[in-house]
Amino acid sequence: MGVAVTRPKDFFIQLENLRHEAGVAARYVYAEMAIQHAASKSKKLLNRLNDTPTFWIACGAAFQSAAYIALGRMFDTTSRYNVEELLKTLEDNLHLFQPAALAERKRNGKAEDPDWLAEYLAEAYYPTLADVLRIRKKVDGHRAVYERAIKPVRHKYLAHREKQERSEVSALYAAGTVKEIWRLATFLLQLHDVLWQLLHNGRRPVFRAMRYSVKSIFDSSAQGSHAHESMVGEVKKLMALLETATPNPSIERTRPGKPGRASHVRRWAS
């Protein structure tokens, strides 16, 4: 049996998949939690949401399920596109990060080198297998959290209904915390940033701090450009519109009785 060979193209595909999936997971996680946070800050908004409780309960359940499934796509190792496959193609294609390849990307199709290129290449960082192993160690640490806190819910309740009793379902969700889910989602964003900067700019693979608390992002006067922050910003804008909107009297008169309250549904562990 021959040894599997990964092509340079495979790394670019895996990196693009990480960009996409990290954004998807972050948006699902932070959309639901930002709604909950907004409702906790304003009784008026909470009452508005409870005018249509079934809709918001459905939204919350959909966001939560999609978030767990999206995280699974990246941390499970049984598919073609996940973090483990990304690291394999990274290790097999370290030549993509060496001076000649970086120079080619910086030329951007031009025949002649720009004046600054030689100095840029001299100061750039070129990864070794030791860097891959260090990144892999970080991934393994986050995968351990996924295996404990996310995978059981995903496999035993969301994808397959092995648990049904409320106490059993609650126990599955209680294995993880909100903070851990935030950190899993933002780690994928960090990982993409690190690998993209290493590939395109020759920057040392350093995992820089990233805001992950929904409260700190929501209550800030400005949101950043990362997927989770921009999603919190959009939710904040939507909640402000709902809170200040003028109710339609005709809809108010025909509205059916409230089947429940949107505020009480939260599977996330605290």
Image: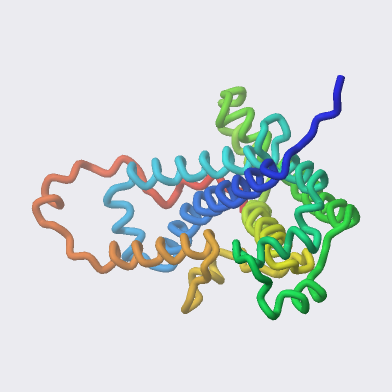
Which quadrant: the N terminus?
Answer: top right
Colour theme: rainbow
* 104 sits to left or right of 220: right
Q: Position of residue 94 (x, y in %)?
A: 81, 52
Identity of the residue furthest to the left in this view: 250
Q: Tell me if residue 268 comes above or below residue 205 in the rendering.
A: above
Residue at position x 44%, y 66% from top? 233
Q: Nearer the viewer, residue 216 or 129?
A: 129
Identity of the residue furthest to the front in this view: 111
Q: Quadrant of residue 226?
A: bottom right
Q: Is residue 193 visible?
A: yes
Q: Tell me if residue 77 comes above or below residue 86 in the rendering.
A: above
Q: Is residue 144 visible?
A: no
* 31 sits to left or right of 99: left
Which quadrant: the C terminus?
Answer: bottom right
Q: Tell me if residue 103 comes above or below residue 80 in the rendering.
A: below
Residue at position x 74%, y 58% from top? 101
Q: Quadrant of residue 207?
A: bottom right
Q: Position of residue 61 (x, y in %)?
A: 46, 41
